[in-house]
Every structure is written in C-alpha cells, then in structure tokens.
Amino acid sequence: MTDTVAPSAPLVAGDPAADAVRRAGLRRMRTVAVGLLVLAAVVYVVTRDRDGFLGFVNAGAEASMVGAIADWFAVTALFKHPLGLPIPHTALIPKRKDDLGRGLEEFVGENFLQEAIIRDRIGAAGISQRVGVWLAQPDNARRVVDEVAEVAAIALTKVRDEHIESLVRDALTPRFREEPIAPLLGGLLSEALRDDLHHGLVDLALEELHGWLVENPDTVADVLGERAPWWAPPRLNDAVTGRIHLELVKWVGDIRDDPQHRARAALDSVLTQLADDLLHDAATQARAEALKERILDNPAVIRSAISLWDALRLALTSSLQDPAGAVRQRMLTEVTAFADRLGSDASLRARLDGLAADAAVFVVDRYGAEVTAVITHTIERWDGREAARRIELHVGRDLQFIRINGTVVGGLVGVLIHAVSVALG
C-alpha cells in the first residue's frame, strides 16, 4: 500500500472549546513522556561506565530510553510516519482508515446490534416504569398534553379545503361507487333489528315529535289549513285542524307510551321487509344503487364534506388551543390515568417493554445494516491526515501513558537484567 491518501471530503469540525481542552491535555501528557525520556538520558550519561549501585541505575536508565523510544515509535506510527520517514506499516490510520471503518462497522453490528443484547438492555432499562414515574409528575403530564395539542393544532391547520375535496372526489367517491351499497345497508339494518337497536331511535323520535306537536299547534294548523278546500268556511277549517292536531298529539303519545302499539309493529314489519329486500330483492337493490349514484353525483356532497371538516377543524383547533378546553382536559385526564396504570400494573409494564423490545429488534433487523454502514461511509469521506489528527486529539492523551509506562517498565526490566548479569558473572 502506498502512502498516497485519496482525496476525500473534509472532516466535520468538532467543538472548538472541547478541542482546545483536549489539545492542552495531549500537550501536557506529551511533555511528561518526553520529560521522562530526557531524564532517563541524563541519568544514563551521568552514570555511564560506573559500577556498583550506579551500574544498576545506568542499566535501568538505558532500558528506560529503549522502552520510551520504542513506545514513542509505536504510538506515533498510528497517526503518521515517525520523523517523517516512510517506514513500512506506519501512518496506519491515514492509510488504512477505510479498513478501520469497516472493522468498526462489523464490531458494532456483531457486538451491539444483536437481538439478545437489545432485549436485555431494554428490559434492564425499565422504559415503561421510567415513563410512568415521569408522567406521574403533573408538570410533565401537562407538558406532554401541551406538546401534543400544539402539534395537532398545527397539523389541522395544514389540511386545506382542496385536500378534503381531493380526498372525497379521488379516493372516497370512486371507492363508494365500486362497493354495492344495498347488501351493506341490508346487513346493518338486519343486525339493528335483531338487537332492537332501532327502538331507542324510535322512542327518541316519538318523544321529540310529541313535544313539537304540543308546543306548535299554530304551525300544525297552518300546514293543515294550506290543504283545506278554498270553499270551506274558516270556522269549519279551524275546528277540523284543531281536532286533527289533538288526534295527532294523542296518537303519537299512544305510540310513545305503548311498546306494543300496532304502529310500532307495523314499523318493525316495514323495516324487516326493507332489510330483506336490500339483501335479496334485485329491484330494491337497483333502486338503492341508483340512489347512491345520485347522491355521489350531487355537487353538494363535496361541499357538505368540506363544511363538515371546516366545522370539525374549527371546534378541535379552538379546544386544542385553549388550555382549559375540553379536549386538553380530557387528554390530561387520560395521560394521568395511563401514568397511574403504569405505576400499579406490572403486567402492563411487561407488555409495553416487550413491545418496545420487539420494535427495536424489528428496526435493527430491517435497518441495522444501513445504520452501521453509516460508519464506513462517513469514515471513507474523511481526509486521512485530518482523520488521524482528530482521532489523536481524542485518544492521544491516553496513548501517552503507553510511552510513560514503557519508560518506567523498561527501566525496571533493565535493572532486573543487569542484576541477573551480575549474579551470573
């Protein structure tokens, strides 16, 4: 491999303040390492050609210099050529940064992005319990509600009328045209009749109709009077309309108060027959489909959808923007209740932690390779010399301990070897 470093993108600069601190620390440790080497050299020169105790000191100083220089060479060879000499297998990081990036990618993938490790770490983290404790604080719960409400309000304002028109015209209307409406209506009506769900609606309608008839006799008289013959005397018309109004009130009241009234039975019979026809009668189905087509072709459908959306959006936005609004208060109640459940229900916490682990494993299985590939792609874009300088800035201070240890350990080994030499001589 040659020393030529291929052109690449510059390395992104780090925090200047933090880099200044690292640079100062690296400089201090280099000074200590060089100082020990100089001290060993001075001691070696002073004690040269001496016997006895000073002979041991001289041997230790000599070995210290050898250890210090060897370790200086090893540390320096990682980042650049020692003394600028193109010695083989030096300047490893600038020349082999791409290989180091791939190795780091494999290391992360094999040792961190494994299912067992992920599940173990998520289980040990107790995510759901931490969330429950955090949400149990009223200020935190309100903060969550405020953030969600603000995002939801912004999202609502981004949906414009043309979006709703496009949704109804291009998505919903074609889908409704394709779907036969008669079987759906017939099935829903049959289920409602089987479960007597319609009785509540009938009771409500009768109650409202009876109340309206009682409170609006003049309106009823006017409607009936419009149907009276022109030649009938007004007095007679008043008497007839008054009597009809009383009978209507009495009849509707009877139906309302009698669950077994014949009118109710007749209504049930009509609805039952309608449900059966919608499911099985071709003519009824055709009429239902024709009615559906007329409704879908009516321009009022889109206008009604837009008006309904505008009304719903206005109501929701107003309530979301109001700190005391019903929506926010309900959200706060639900968040608080959820926090209480997280604190007291261990099975719920276990399920949520399991879901979190499943989600993390899924993401890693699906995208883990892309995530770790970022390491390789990023390092490949770095300039080799700049990458070496930045890495040395981060780890070089600790690497200087190798030089210091080499100096100290080399000296001790030198003393030991000299002692063995003396003993054998």
Image: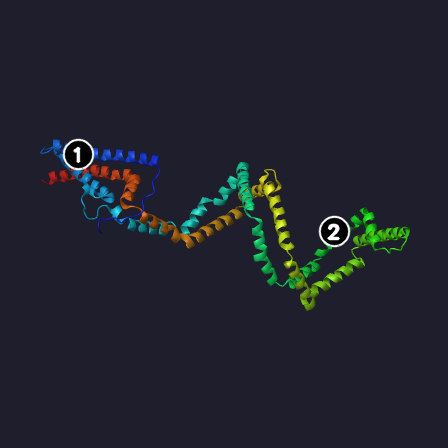
Q: Residue 325 is drawn in which quadrant?
A: top right
Q: Is residue 240 visible?
A: yes
Residue 364 at x, y percent in the picture? 42, 52
Q: Is residue 70 visible?
A: no
Instruction: Sort mark 2 into few (<14), some (14-19) or many (20+) by Cα contacts within 10 Å.
Output: few
Question: Who is closer to the viewer here, 57 or 183?
Answer: 183
Residue 340 image label: none
What kind of element bears circle 2?
helix
Q: Is residue 172 left or right of residue 201?
A: left
Tag 2–tag 1 contact (CB < 8 Å)? no
Residue lying farthest to the front in this orientation: 230
Residue found 51% across the figure and 39% down from its top: 134
Q: Amino acid at mark 2?
A: Leu
Instruction: Sort mark 1 into few (<14), some (14-19) or many (20+) by Cα contacts within 10 Å.
Output: many
Q: Residue 389 is drawn in which quadrant?
A: top left
Q: Amino acid at mark 1?
A: Ala
- Please identify the quadrant where the C terminus is shown: top left
For marks 2 and 1 on the same chain, the one whose residue lies earlier in the sequence: 1
Residue 273 at x, y percent in the picture? 73, 64
Q: Is residue 61 left or right of residue 107?
A: left
Residue topped by disc 2:
204
Question: Closer to the observer: label 2 or label 1?
Answer: 2
In the image, residue 339 above or below residue 274: above
Question: Who is closer to the viewer here, 283 or 147?
Answer: 283
Residue found 24% across the figure and 47% down from its top: 92
Residue 40 image label: 1
Residue 57 at x, y percent in the picture? 15, 33
How many labels sit on residues?
2
In the image, residue 171 above or below residue 100: below
In the image, residue 394 above or below residue 362: above
Residue found 25% across the figure and 38% down from its top: 400
